[in-house]
Image (tube, rainbow, N blue to C red):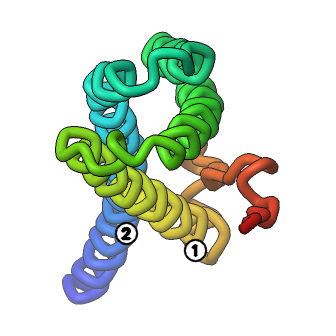
Amino acid sequence: MAAWIWIVIGIIAFVVIIFFWYYNRFAVLVNRIENSLSQIDVQLKRRADLIPNLIETVQGFVKHEKTAIKAVSDARKAMISAKGFEGKVRADGILEAALGKLFAIAEAYPDLKANTNFLELQRELSTTEDRVAYARQSYNDSILSYNTLCTTLPGKFFASLYGRKSKEYLKIAEAERKVVKVDF
């Protein structure tokens, strides 16, 4: 009889451990997702902080290109004041487009293209773009792990028990999917 009690206690302990393990696994994955979002936000802020220096450098060379400079400045302000992750991603897309136009204008000014300040800022922005891309990839990898746990057995059972649902991947904007046309 005593052996039977130990078997029941062992089974109950095993079941309790499984419940705790799945709860903690969901908590770890949610924390990883939140950290990935925070990393994206940090890199977007870093890029926004570089832009005033870039604008100042460009303004010294291209005094009559005020619309492009204003577009970058306005896009930066919109990104900084954007609320929620979706709003920041949308504002970031607008900022990327404005920066692209600014760099295209810079191509017409050899003195600006050769300016060490401009080159350094351009390199910093390029490095930041790489960091943003990596942070986005990390976010989607975290979502993949979380969603896999939510949709496979026995994780699906525990996901419904703990009220966890699959999350959306970070998607690129439709404008970014288009093939870039290069003219020479």
Q: Which residue is mark 2?
A: 18
Q: In the image, what residue occupies the spot 34% across and 38% down?
A: 38
Q: In the image, what residue occupies the spot 52% across and 61% down?
A: 140
Evaluate whether residue 27 shows in this view: no
Q: In the image, what residue occupies the spot 21% across and 48% down?
A: 120
User: Does residue 48 lie above or below 111 as drawn?
Assistant: above
- Look at the numbered discs 2 and 1 and tell me whether their residues touch, using CB distance below 8 Å: yes
Evaluate whether residue 123 shows in this view: yes
**Residue type for callout 2:** Ile
The answer to whether 63 appears left or right of 24 in the picture is right
Question: Where's residue 22, x and y in %?
Answer: 41, 62
User: Does residue 5 lie above or below 21 as drawn?
Assistant: below
Question: 37 or 180: nearer the eye?
Answer: 180
Q: Give the quadrant of the N terminus.
A: bottom left
Q: Which residue is mark 1?
A: 154
Instruction: Give the total of numbered labels.
Output: 2
Question: In which image quadrant can residue 50 be found?
Answer: top left
Question: Where's residue 104, x and y in %?
Answer: 57, 45
**Residue type for callout 1:** Pro
Question: 53 or 22: nearer the eye?
Answer: 53
Q: Give the quadrant of the C terminus.
A: bottom right
Q: Secondary structure at mark 1?
A: loop
Question: Where's residue 39, x and y in %?
Answer: 32, 44
Question: In which image quadrant can residue 9 be found?
Answer: bottom left
Question: How many neighbours does mark 1 have within 10 angstroms: few (below 14), some (14-19), or many (20 or more)?
Answer: few
Q: In the image, what residue occupies the spot 49% across and 69% down?
A: 145
User: Does residue 135 lie above or below 102 as drawn?
Assistant: below
